[in-house]
Amino acid sequence: MSAAEEPVTQNAITGGVFFNMVVQGNNITVVLPPAVTPALSGLPHASKSFTGRDSPMGELMAALAPDCEDAGGPVLVSATVGLAGVGKTELVVQAAHRATTQLGWFPGGVLFVDLFGYDPDPAGDPTSRRVSTGEVLGGLLQALGMPGDYVPAGVQDRSRLFRSVLAAYAGEGKRILVVIDNAATVDQVNPLLPGDGVTATLVTSRDKLDIEARRHELSVLGRVASVRLLADGVCCTNW
C-alpha cells in the first residue's frame, strides 16, 4: 500500500480533565490506571433545626455568589471565626448545602475536610483526630479522582497538584467549593487554599488566622433564637 493509500488515523478526545500526556496513533495498546470516581458530595448532614443566623448566612451566600466582588476583586475565601461551640461548622455546612443547589454556582460539587485542628497533639494523645496537612491533601486529591499512585509524597508537591486539579476542573466549567473546618493554624490551612482565582473556599476557625480571606465573626445565638432551638429539642455541641 502506498503512502497515499494508508488510512488516516483521527482521534478525538472530549470530556473529562487530563493531567498527563495523551498518546494518539494507530494500533497502540495503552494500559490505563484504574478509574477513580471523584467524591465531590461529601458534605455532612445539615440540621433541620438551624435558626437565628439569617445575617451571617446572607453574608456567606453573597460572598459565594459567582458574581460577588470585593473592593480588590472576587471573594474567594471566607473565614468564619468564633468561640468553640458557637455554631461555625453548622453555619458553613448550611451555606455550602444552599450554595451547591444554586444553578451554576458550583457545578463541580463540594469538597469537605475537618482538620480537627484543636484536638491534642497526636504525638502525646493517640486518641487525637488531628490530621497532617499531607494526609489531608492526599485524601482531597483522591476525592478529586487522582489515583493514589499519582499522588506525590511531599506536602508542597501535593499542594501544587491540588491547586492544579482544582484549576483544571474550573477550566472545564466544573467549579468546586472547598470547605475547611476547624483550622487552628495558618500552616494547616494555607496549602489547602486554591490559587486559580476562581475556586471558592469556606474556612472555620476559633482564631483570626492571618490568611487572605473575608472574615465573618460569629457570636452566640440571641435569646429568642436560643429558646426556639431548645424548644425544638436540639442538643448539639455544634451550637
Image (tube, rainbow, N blue to C red):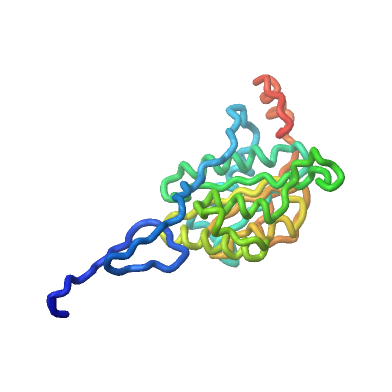
Residue 91 vertical placement versus 203 (above, below): above
* Residue drawn 52% across the image and 60% down it: 165
Decide: is 86 above or below 234: below
User: Residue 199: horizontal and vertical position, in percent?
Assistant: 53, 58
Is 104 displayed left or right of 87 in the figure? left
- From the viewer's perspective, is 5 left or right of 182? left
Q: Residue at x 71, y 28 (%)?
A: 236
> Where the C terminus falls, by quadrant?
top right
In front of the other: 166 or 77:
166
Quarter occupied by residue 43 = top right
Residue 213 occupies quadrant:
bottom right
Residue 5, horizontal then vertical, whole percent:
12, 75
Q: Quadrant of the N terminus?
A: bottom left
The residue at 66%/65% (across/down) is 156
Image coordinates for residue 8, horizontal then vertical, percent:
19, 71
Farthest residue, direction bottom:
3
The residue located at (75%, 41%) in the rendering is: 129
Count of numbered tags: 0
- Residue extending furthest toward the right: 124
Q: Position of residue 211 (x, y in %)?
A: 70, 61
